[in-house]
Amino acid sequence: MRIGLGYDLHRTVAGRPLVLANITIPHDKGLDGHSDADVVLHALIDALTGAAGLPDVGQMFPNTDPKYKGINSGELLKATMVEFAKTGWRIVNTDIIVLAQKPKLSPHKPAMIKRLAELLGVREDQVNIKGKTGESVDAVGEEKAIACHCVVLLEK
């Protein structure tokens, strides 16, 4: 068995959609980044690749490569899963914490879990998402950023 840990954070900005777990969530701000800036998928990719001994998200999909400009991070996770499948590891579960002062994520959690399970090829009960606020402290609490922590457990 192996455990992988992933983390990502992006600044919030006006004029971009908010995409978390490959789901567009209604909000007045989105996340700034080279791709769609989906912190959930980026943290998940890093957790998976770290546990499986693969290159991290920045190595696999560098933000210096124009072909990834504005890309849907679901496509990045799909490409990661192709490489992941070659390792012989299987996902036991993933546990994800999204840190966002706003919006509240609880209404969106079922759709987020369903989409992640589809992308990962696992059952929904193998995916857990929790939303936490920044308690009005730090960049998350001041609504300047959204972050994500992700852990995955793998087995052969």
Image: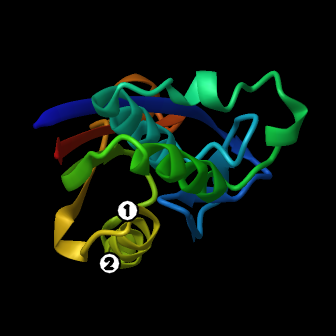
- Which of the image's four quarters has the N terminus? top left
Q: N-terminal of the two: label 1 or label 2?
A: 1
Q: What is the secondary structure assignment of the residue under circle 2?
A: helix
Task: Reply above or below: 63 against 92.
Answer: above
Q: What is the secondary structure assignment of the residue under circle 1?
A: loop
**25 or 21: which is nearer to us?**
21
Indicate the position of residue 19 as horizontal and vertical percent values: 59, 58
In the rendered image, which quarter is residue 133 located in? top left
Q: What distance separates the C-alpha of mark 1 from that of mark 2?
A: 13 Å
Amino acid type of disc 2? Pro
Indicate the position of residue 108 as horizontal and vertical percent values: 39, 73
Q: Residue at x 37, y 62 (%)?
A: 104
Mark 2 residue crowding within 10 angstroms, few (<14) / some (14–19) / many (20+): few
Single out the residue that lies furthest toward the right: 66
**87 or 130: which is nearer to us?**
87
In front: label 1 or label 2: 2
In the rendered image, which quarter is residue 25 located in? bottom right
Q: Mark yes or no: residue 132 visible.
A: no
Task: Reply above or below: 53 against 101.
Answer: above
Badge 1 is on which residue? Answer: 104
Q: Residue at x 62, y 29 (%)?
A: 60
Kindly indicate whether the residue at mark 2 contacts the one at mark 1 (C-beta within 8 angstroms).
no
Task: Reply above or below: 137 against 91.
Answer: above
In the image, taking residue 150 as reference, residue 31 lies left or right, namely right
Indicate the position of residue 82 as horizontal and vertical percent values: 52, 52
Amino acid type of disc 1? Lys
Please count the marks in the image: 2
In the rendered structure, find residue 110 and report the number of the disc placed on it: 2
**28 or 106: which is nearer to us?**
106
Q: Which residue is drawn at 71% across and 35% down?
A: 33
In the rendered structure, find residue 154 and report the number of the disc placed on it: none
